[in-house]
Image (tube, rainbow, N blue to C red):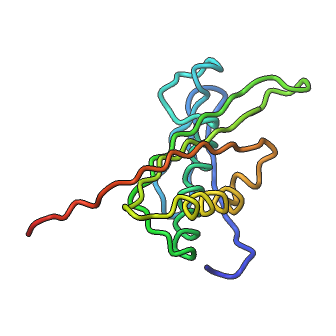
């Protein structure tokens, strides 16, 4: 990891209606719009979906680092995220975020070790740690036999 602090920049362009485009150096442009729930077209990434995707991506990349440092082998992560937007104290905001990681691990993996790694991942994810909304994690740990491939 490069020394801190890190700086990130994005650019958004848009007009009084329709789609907006988010860009950053070296990555594809994202088309964004309000979600259908807020009278948007529902066919482009919304800010709400992008927030969830940001938390999910951060969780995976943090899990990779924590698992490596903890000598935990995992085979795959499928991660569903759900965010609830509601009115709270007169402000429309995310009131709940829930991550449901389905983590596949090889036979013989210690479940307590897996849980400890998942707990540390939750605490170490910088995106979710930056949010005022609590993030709940409901893991599903699956032991999966590794399939040998013939060559």
Left or right: where 46 falls relative to 91: left
Question: Residue furthest toward the left?
Answer: 151
Farthest residue, direction bottom:
3
| Res 20 quadrant in image | top right
Q: Where is residue 40 in the image (x, y as percent from the top left)?
A: 59, 22
Residue 88 spot, x, y in % from top left:
85, 26
Image quarter hosting the N terminus: bottom right
Closer to us: 1 or 125: 125
Residue 151 place in picture, x, y as percent: 8, 69
Residue 93 lies left or right of residue 11; in this view the side is right
Q: In this rendering, is residue 23 above or below 113?
A: above
Q: Residue furthest right?
A: 89
Total numbered circles: 0
* Of 142 and 28, the residue lying toward us: 142
Task: Tell me what residue is drawn at x 57 percent, y 64 percent.
Answer: 113
Q: Which of 97 and 20 is in front in this view?
A: 97
Give the vertical position of 13 relative to 5 (above or below): above
Q: Residue 59, image x and y in percent? A: 59, 55
Residue at 41 percent across and 64 percent down: it is: 108
Name which quarter of the figure residue 37 lies in: top right
- The quarter of the picture where residue 97 lies is top right
Residue 151 located left or right of residue 124: left
Q: What residue is at 64 percent from the left and 45 percent from the top?
A: 137
- The residue positioned 67% from the left and 28% from the top of the image is 16
């Amino acid at each position: 990891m490069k020394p801190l602090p890190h700086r990130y920049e994005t650019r958004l362009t848009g007009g009084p209606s329709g789609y907006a485009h988010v860009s950053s150096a070296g990555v594809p442009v994202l088309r964004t719009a309000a979600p259908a729930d807020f009278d948007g077209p529902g066919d482009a990434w919304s800010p709400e979906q992008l927030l969830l995707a940001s938390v999910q991506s951060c969780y995976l990349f943090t899990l990779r680092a924590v698992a490596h440092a903890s000598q935990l082998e995992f085979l795959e992560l499928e991660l569903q995220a759900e965010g609830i937007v509601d009115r709270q104290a007169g402000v429309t905001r995310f009131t709940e975020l829930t991550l449901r990681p389905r983590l596949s691990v090889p036979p013989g993996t210690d479940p307590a070790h897996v849980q400890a790694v998942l707990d540390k991942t939750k605490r170490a994810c910088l995106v979710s740690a930056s949010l005022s909304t609590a993030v709940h994690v409901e893991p599903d740990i699956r032991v999966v036999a590794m399939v040998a491939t013939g060559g």
